[in-house]
Image: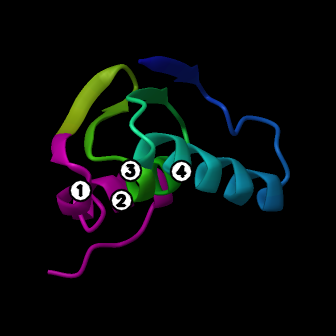
Amino acid sequence: MKFLDKPSLGLAPKMVDEMFAALARINRDGTTLLLFEQNVFQALAVADYAYVLSHGEMIAAGAAWELRGNDLIRRVYLGEAIAN
């Protein structure tokens, strides 16, 4: 198992994309990754399971594919208005 703490911090957008692609390859090759990342949508794109925190409080947990479309996560991280 490998631990990564905010690996995208300070990287240019192109490098962020390349770094997440590399993490996906590493994971596919059989290495378990524990990722602490502020770029929630990039992290959810490569994760199997996630815990999402906001201001030190867990606001969501579950399979990453389920969390990608979560309205609460979009509102908290992107400030999007949620249609009723």
Q: Which residue is mark 3?
A: 76
- Tell me the number on the disc at residue 75: 2
- Look at label 2 and name its amino acid: Arg
CA gap, disc 1 to disc 3? Answer: 13 Å
- Look at label 4 and name its amino acid: Arg
Q: Residue 18 appears in which quarter of the rendering?
A: bottom right
Q: Nearer the viewer, residue 19 or 6?
A: 19
In front of the other: label 4 or label 2? 4
- Look at label 3 and name its amino acid: Val
In front of the other: label 1 or label 3? 1
Q: Which residues are magenta?
A: 61-84
Q: Nearer the viewer, residue 78 or 64?
A: 64
Q: Residue at x 48, y 27 (%)?
A: 36
Q: Position of residue 25 (x, y in %)?
A: 53, 50
CA gap, disc 4 to disc 2? Answer: 30 Å
Q: Position of residue 41 (x, y in %)?
A: 46, 57
* Sequence-earlier tag: 4 or 3: 4
Q: Which residue is mark 1?
A: 67
- Look at label 1 and name its amino acid: Leu
Quarter that holds the C terminus = bottom left
**Local crowd at mark 3 within 10 Å, few (<14), some, or many (≥20)?**
few
Farthest residue to the bottom: give it: 83
Q: Position of residue 79 (x, y in %)?
A: 45, 60
In front of the other: label 2 or label 1? 1
Q: Residue at x 36, y 61 (%)?
A: 74
Q: Which residue is mark 4?
A: 25
User: From what the image shows, is residue 81 above or below residue 4?
Assistant: below
Q: Are marks 2 and 1 in contact (CB under 8 Å)?
A: no
